[in-house]
Amino acid sequence: MKPIYFTAASFDFLRELARHNHRDWFSAHQQDYEQTLRMPFQRLIADLAEPLCTISQHLVADPRKVGGSLFRQHRDTRFSKDKSIYKTWIGARFFHQRGKQVEAPSFYLHIAPGDCFFGGGLWHPQPDTLKKLRNFLDENPNTWRQATMQAGFRERYAFWGESLSRAPRGVDPAHPLIEDLKRKSLACGVPLSASEVLGHRLPEIVLGHMRAIAPMLDYLCAALDLDF
């Protein structure tokens, strides 16, 4: 029988964490976190590693507790007015093998009560990286259309993030891809229902979205001289 990774208790823990976002509560419920969230997510990541290689041999599903695909639960509050210690969601990044040396696109899975989604791309790239992406998009529009405008893609996957109010410097405002050229991030995704996240088909669903978004990641890798 296929495994189920997450349960209603996974969502319950995150709801309670949102109400009791402090060290004493988390320490008292550490075992609940381990059993309902961290370890199930690590198993899911491990189970996705081999199938992910059939999509790209350069993207990594790393199930390690520290330094792998799974985001740490502690928030970085150094530059934030919100000093809450813990994230009230859990997520994992299926990253490019060169992602620790250079900016690179990745897949991402996010789980939170009422806000589960899967996506891929580059979120808030640095100005130099964004300039490379825009130049490549301007010079290679047809391949971008093939990757992101095939039948059903834009109906299924929404592009995320802010956009410039006008065309970037040096770009023709009448460019046929002007809306994509104005984006500050090149990332898209799709919501996941609670039944999908809590069901035994979750790996199959995630892999289906990976395959659908892969041509876009391939394009972004090409723009940044990365293998895919």
Image (cartoon, helix red, strand yellow):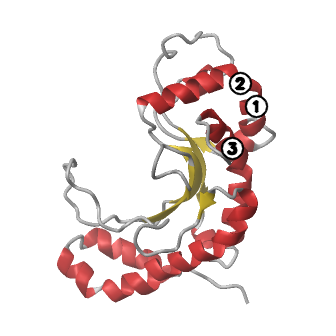
* Quadrant of residue 31 within the rendered picture: bottom left
Identified at 23% across, 65% down, the residue is 85
- What is the spatial separation of the Cα atoms under label 2 and label 1, in whole angstroms? 6 Å
Which image quarter is the N terminus in?
bottom right
Residue at numbered disc 2: 140
Task: Name the side, left or right, on which 140 lies relative to 126.
Answer: right
The image position of residue 100, as x and y in percent, is 45, 52
Task: Name the side, left or right, on which 32 lies relative to 181.
Answer: left
Image height check: is 121 above or below 22? above
Whether the residues at callouts 2 and 1 have beta carbons within 8 Å, the answer is: yes
Residue at numbered disc 3: 218
Task: Name the side, left or right, on which 144 lies relative to 87.
Answer: right
Q: Earlier in the sequence, mark 3 or mark 2?
A: 2
Identified at 49% across, 60% down, the residue is 115
The image position of residue 28, as x and y in percent, is 24, 87
Amino acid, disc 3? Asp
Residue at numbered disc 1: 143
